[in-house]
C-alpha cells in the first residue's frame, strides 16, 4: 500500500483497507479487481458480502468464480461477533500463504446496534491479524451509509481506496479507542423480567428462563439455543464476574427475545468469543464463542463498573 496521507502503525504483512464506493461500477471494479489480482497471484480468496453483491460479483467474474470461496455476509455476519472467527478459519486453512479476503460487515439496512458491533469487529480485525500475512478489503457505500459510519471506517482502517487512489487514513486510531467508543449506553427495555443469580442458583435461573421463553414467538429449537447461551453466560458470570449477576428477559415489538446478563466482571481480552478457541485451551473463551455462534446479535458493554451482554434471538 502507498501511504501518502500520514504514517500508520506497521502491521507487518497484514493490510486492511476500506473501499469507499459510490456506484455499482465502482464496487465491481474495486472488489472484482481485488479478487482477480489475488487469483492471478494464486492466493486463497474469500468473499463475504451481502447476497445481492455476491450475485453481481459472480456474474462479473465469470469462470474465475471457481477459484473463490463465497459467503452471504447477511447470513454469516448476522451477528457481527461471529465474522472474525470465520475470517481467521479461512486464513488458517491456508498456512504459509497470504489470504485475500473481502468482508462487507456494514450495509444500509443494518440496525444501529448491529452497526456498532460491526464497527467493533472492524477495529478488532487490526488486533487479530496484526503480523499475519493477509489482506482484508472492506467495501463501504458512502452514498447510502450515514456519515458517522463512514467516519468510523476511516478510524478502523489504516488505509483506504477512493476515486482510484490508495491513501493512508489520517483518522485511524488504536482498536481500543474505537471499542471504548462503541460502549455507549444501552437503551432500557419498557418492561423486563429480572432474575438475580449466584453460585448454586444457575439451574434454577436456567429453568426460569426456559419457562419464560415458552411464552415468546421463538420455536423450540431457537428457545433451546437461547437457554444454552444464557446458561453459558451466567456460568461465566459466576466464575469470572464476581460470583453474582442479574439476568433480565424481555421481547421487542418484532418478537425478538432479548436476554441481558450483567455482573461486576470485566473483559480482559476484547477478542474473547470472537476467535475459535483452541481445543487444548483450558480457558479459551469457549463459552463466549458458543454464545456468538448461537445468537443473532450479541451486544457487549465493558465499563468500569462491570460487564453487560445482551443476547438477541429473532423468531
Image: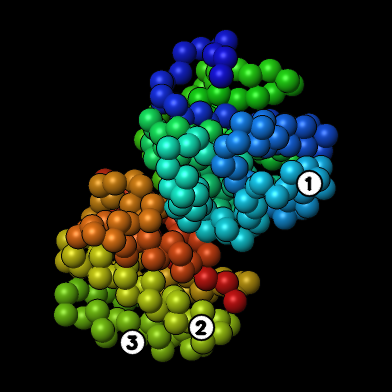
Mark 1–mark 2 distance (CA, rounded to whole Å): 40 Å
Question: Would residue 87 be found to the left or right of residue 237 on screen?
Answer: right
Question: Would residue 173 be found to the left or right of residue 141 on screen?
Answer: left
Q: Residue at x 19, y 74 (%)?
A: 198
Question: Would residue 44 be found to the left or right of residue 304 on screen?
Answer: right
Above-or-below relation of 100 to 76: above
Q: Mark 1 points at which residue?
A: 63
**Badge nearest the viewer, 3 or 1:** 1
Query: In what element is the residue under mark 1?
Result: helix
Mark 3–mark 1 distance (CA, rounded to whole Å): 53 Å
Which of 99 and 294 lies nearest the eye of the viewer?
Answer: 99
Image quadrant for the N terminus?
top right
Q: Residue at x 42, y 70 (%)?
A: 259
Label 1 crowd (10 A; few <14 / some 14-19 / many >=20): few
Q: Residue at x 16, y 80 (%)?
A: 200
Mark 1 and mark 3 in contact (Cβ < 8 Å)? Answer: no
Numbered mark located on residue 221 in the image: 2
Amino acid at each position: 500500500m502507498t501511504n501518502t496521507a500520514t504514517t500508520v502503525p506497521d502491521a507487518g504483512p497484514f493490510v486492511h483497507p476500506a473501499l469507499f464506493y459510490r456506484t455499482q461500477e465502482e464496487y465491481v471494479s474495486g472488489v472484482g479487481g481485488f479478487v482477480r489480482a489475488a487469483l492471478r497471484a494464486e492466493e486463497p480468496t474469500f468473499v463475504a458480502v451481502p447476497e445481492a453483491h455476491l450475485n453481481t460479483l459472480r456474474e462479473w467474474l465469470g469462470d474465475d468464480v471457481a477459484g473463490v470461496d463465497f459467503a452471504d455476509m447477511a447470513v454469516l455476519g448476522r451477528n457481527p461477533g461471529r465474522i472474525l472467527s470465520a475470517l481467521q478459519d479461512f486464513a488458517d486453512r491456508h498456512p504459509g500463504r497470504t489470504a485475500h479476503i473481502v468482508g462487507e460487515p456494514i450495509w444500509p439496512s443494518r440496525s444501529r446496534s448491529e452497526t456498532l458491533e460491526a464497527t467493533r469487529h472492524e477495529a478488532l480485525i487490526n488486533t487479530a491479524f496484526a503480523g499475519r500475512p493477509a489482506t482484508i478489503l472492506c467495501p463501504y457505500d458512502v452514498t447510502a451509509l450515514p456519515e458517522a459510519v463512514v467516519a468510523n471506517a476511516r478510524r478502523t482502517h489504516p488505509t483506504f481506496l477512493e476515486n482510484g487512489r490508495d491513501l493512508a487514513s489520517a483518522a485511524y486510531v488504536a482498536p481500543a479507542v474505537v471499542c471504548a467508543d462503541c460502549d455507549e449506553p444501552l437503551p432500557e427495555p419498557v418492561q423486563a423480567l429480572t432474575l438475580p443469580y449466584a453460585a448454586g442458583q444457575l439451574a434454577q435461573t436456567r429453568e426460569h428462563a426456559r419457562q419464560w421463553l415458552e411464552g415468546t414467538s421463538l420455536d423450540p429449537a431457537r428457545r433451546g439455543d437461547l437457554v444454552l447461551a444464557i446458561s453459558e453466560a451466567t456460568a461465566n458470570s459466576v466464575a469470572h464476574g464476581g460470583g453474582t449477576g442479574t439476568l433480565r428477559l424481555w421481547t421487542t415489538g418484532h418478537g425478538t427475545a432479548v436476554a441481558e446478563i450483567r455482573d461486576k466482571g470485566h473483559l480482559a481480552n476484547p477478542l474473547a468469543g470472537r476467535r475459535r478457541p483452541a481445543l487444548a485451551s483450558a480457558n479459551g473463551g469457549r463459552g463466549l464463542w458458543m454464545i456468538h455462534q448461537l445468537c443473532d446479535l450479541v451486544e457487549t458493554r465493558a465499563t468500569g463498573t462491570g460487564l453487560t451482554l445482551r443476547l438477541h434471538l429473532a423468531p
